[in-house]
Image (cartoon, rainbow, N blue to C red):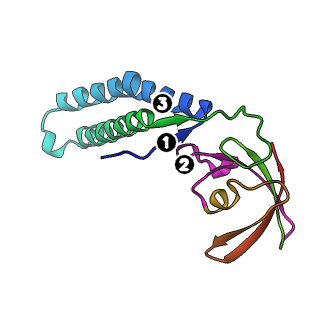
Amino acid sequence: MSSKEVVLTQDGLKKLEEELSYLKSVKRREVASRIKTAISFGDLSDNSEYEDAKNEQAFIEGRIITLEKMLRNARLIDNDEDNKEVVGFGSRVFLKDLEGGEELEFTIVGSAESDPMNNKISNESPVGQSIFGSRVGSVVEVKTPAGIIKYKILDIK
């Protein structure tokens, strides 16, 4: 069974490693302490504190497994490369919506680092797929539920 490769920048790798370390060293202990305290209350069949702590423990253990798998399958990308010719991982891309005239800026990252609220879009997103591998001056079409949007690539940094 092959696992999906997880493309990460150095920053993304660091964030995942920090989260994993925090979950293993801090959150596990906190939840274990909550479970121990809840058990001391007696009857577990009607003990909401115990139930909540067990649910949180299951979530934390699941997240730890997910993070470990992501890190095992990580492929680090060098976002310091000076390739400003073609959109790739780590590229900061400046686009213009040819219909509305709006100018947008995105950084292309792997799906594990995707954060649209901070203008980090995945290479697997509709916009990311459409602009990946394109050059400055290219016009790309992005298929969306609302129809096709055309963007011109203004710059790549």
Residue at x 72%, y 31% (from the top left corner): 80
Badge 2 amino acid: Ser
Q: How crowded is mark 3: few (under 14 residues within 10 Å), some or many (20 or more)?
A: some
| Closer-to-camera residue (146/83) | 83
Q: How crowded is mark 2: few (under 14 residues within 10 Å), some or many (20 or more)?
A: some
Query: Quick one: 100 or 122, which is closer to the camera?
Result: 122
Disc 2, SS: helix
- Tags 1 and 2 in contact by the CB under 8 Å rule? yes
Query: In front: mark 3 or mark 2?
Result: 2
Q: Residue furthest bottom?
A: 147
Placement of 105 over or under 67, stated as above or below: below
The residue to which callout 2 is attached is 111
Q: Earlier in the sequence, mark 1 or mark 2?
A: 1
| Residue placed under numbered mark 1 in the picture | 6
Residues under numbered marks 3 and 2 in contact, where contact means CB atoms less than 8 Å apart? no
Q: How far apart are marks 1 and 3 (CA)?
A: 16 Å
